Image (cartoon, rainbow, N blue to C red):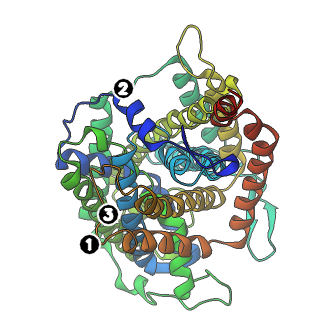
């Protein structure tokens, strides 16, 4: 069944590969172009539509463009490591499964619990951005002004005082409504349509290109000076440290590229096409992000961009209301699809962990009529709606980013471990430069971005992990399926 014992017991990679072949048998039909389009569709979303403004206003100023470069580099290294793992272990569970096969059950639990945070909080982040664009759309298209008391978070985080402050608002109703609506759809069993997804991808990319084409002529170069605002005496508040903390914030913009690596078993030529799909989609998105951030901070002073709908604010500054409406519609559609995918993906992690005995069987309970994992879908939706309704977008985005970076560190380390322990396993794709160069760079760059996160964000991650460890030792370790099988063998 695997190697090691106790907390460090690992699943057998050979058995995982057999399971993948037996259960999936996927047709190898995806070309390099298909993978590039898949990557672009998965990457472009909340990061560019929502977080660009926050990172510019609070952390990096116009130098947010450099934050995108740093985030893209870290993603490229991690993406190559994901590709090698996916080509060896092409089954569901993502980084959780990779960790179980390389670093043992305890680390697998840690990364699984971390992924739960990532998916859950990411969907909350998207809901807040969705709310911002809906409010802007109703105002620009119909002159309807929704009250701020019911469309924004009741609290904000004061980094200097390290405390929450009340804003006077009550709750972000649109954010709650969209999460509950998507949750209801998922409980009933919504099947994703490739055609609808393709249309939404086209809309998202078209909106970004429209903004670039029509807003560029309204740039005022004086808004770029100073390009790197002077540090204001605290880490991450402009200056060089602000660029890196901004990178941690906008790293959210790159989440989704791992969708390319999960298609390893369906790629015609994974050895050649996986790195092309990952690196080219990341490169295209990075270039688009840099151009958009430069135009945005050139059209509007970065000090005015700390809002959940910065692209709309940039367009409004140009006076082209038709473009503002187009951007808002495209953003609303794009963010809706991202939310659907996030809330759809969450139960997969619960499923994989419940199947291994680390969660109660109820976590994988299926609705008798709809055939969906309704228990975990409803729980996830309610928690996500609560977070989106009461928390500010910066806290949600930073938690998602640091959770994802943590997963990247472990996957990068896992590639090195498997190269050393199991060099015999067939790999449809290998990271270039041997067993150490890319994985070490992946772990280090992701680790550096984690280090530059705010103190409060790091503390929140540790608190979440502490809760997870308590659950593992109280329940997961005792009910581990792998442990039960080993003990059964030992007693026979």
User: Residue drawn 53% across and 17% down?
Assistant: 188
Work out which residue is located at the far top of the displayed protein and give it: 369
Q: Which numbered dot is residue 217?
A: 1
| Residue located 43% across and 43% down the image | 141
Find residue 487 and report its horizontal and vertical position in percent. Answer: 70, 33
Q: Secondary structure at mark 3?
A: loop
Q: Position of residue 94 (x, y in %)?
A: 47, 45
Mark positioned earlier in the residue sequence (2 or 1): 2
In the rendered image, the quadrant that contains the C terminus is top right
Give x and y (percent) for residue 111: 60, 51
What residue would you read off at disc 2? 22
What whole-number distance in Å separates the C-alpha atoms at marks 2 and 1? 56 Å
Instruction: Say which quarter of the image contains residue 383.
Output: top right
Quarter assignment of residue 319: bottom left
The label nearer to you, 3 versus 1, is: 3
Between discs 3 and 2, the one toward the N terminus: 2
């Amino acid at each position: 069944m695997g190697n090691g014992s106790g907390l460090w017991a690992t699943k057998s990679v050979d058995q995982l590969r057999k399971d993948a072949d037996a259960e999936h048998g996927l047709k190898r039909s995806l070309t390099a172009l298909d993978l590039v389009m898949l990557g672009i569709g998965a990457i472009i979303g909340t990061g560019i539509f929502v977080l660009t403004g926050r990172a510019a206003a609070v952390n990096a100023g116009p130098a947010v463009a450099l934050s995108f470069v740093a985030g893209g580099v870290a993603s490229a290294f991690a993406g190559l490591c994901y590709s090698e793992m996916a080509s060896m272990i092409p089954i569901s569970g993502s980084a959780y499964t990779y960790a179980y096969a390389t670093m043992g059950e305890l680390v697998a639990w840690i990364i699984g619990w971390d992924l739960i945070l990532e998916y859950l909080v990411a969907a909350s982040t998207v809901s807040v951005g969705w709310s911002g664009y809906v409010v802007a759309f109703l105002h620009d298209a119909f002159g309807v002004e929704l009250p701020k008391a019911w469309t924004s978070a009741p609290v904000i985080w004061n980094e200097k005082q390290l405390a929450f402050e009340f804003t006077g608002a009550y709750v972000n109703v649109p954010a709650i409504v969209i999460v509950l609506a998507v949750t209801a759809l998922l409980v009933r069993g919504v099947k994703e349509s490739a055609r609808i997804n393709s249309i939404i991808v086209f809309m998202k990319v078209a909106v970004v290109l429209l903004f670039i084409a029509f807003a560029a002529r309204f740039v005022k170069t004086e808004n770029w000076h100073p390009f790197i605002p002077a540090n204001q005496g605290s880490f991450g508040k402009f200056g060089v440290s602000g660029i890196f903390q901004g990178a941690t914030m906008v790293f959210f913009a790159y989440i989704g590229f791992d969708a390319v690596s999960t298609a390893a078993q369906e790629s015609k030529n994974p050895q050649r096409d996986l790195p092309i799909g990952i690196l080219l989609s990341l490169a295209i998105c990075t270039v688009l992000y840099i151009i958009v951030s430069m135009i945005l901070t050139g059209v509007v002073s970065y000090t005015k961009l700390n809002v959940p709908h910065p692209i709309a604010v940039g367009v409004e500054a140009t006076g082209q209301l038709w473009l503002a409406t187009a951007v808002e519609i495209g953003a609303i559609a794009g963010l809706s699809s991202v939310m659907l995918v996030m809330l759809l993906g969450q139960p997969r992690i619960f499923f994989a962990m419940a199947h291994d005995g680390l969660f109660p069987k109820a976590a994988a309970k299926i609705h008798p009529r709809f055939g969906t994992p309704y228990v975990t879908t409803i729980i996830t939706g309610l928690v996500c709606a609560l977070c989106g309704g009461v928390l500010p977008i910066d806290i949600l985005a930073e938690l998602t980013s640091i959770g994802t970076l943590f997963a990247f560190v472990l996957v990068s380390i896992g590639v090195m471990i498997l190269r050393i322990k199991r060099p015999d396993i067939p790999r449809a794709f290998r990271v270039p430069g041997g067993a150490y160069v890319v994985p070490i760079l992946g772990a280090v760059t992701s680790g550096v971005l984690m280090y530059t996160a705010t103190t409060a964000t790091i503390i929140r991650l540790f608190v979440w992990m502490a809760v997870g460890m308590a659950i593992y030792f109280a329940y997961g370790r005792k009910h581990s399926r792998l442990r039960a099988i080993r003990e059964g063998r030992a007693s026979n």
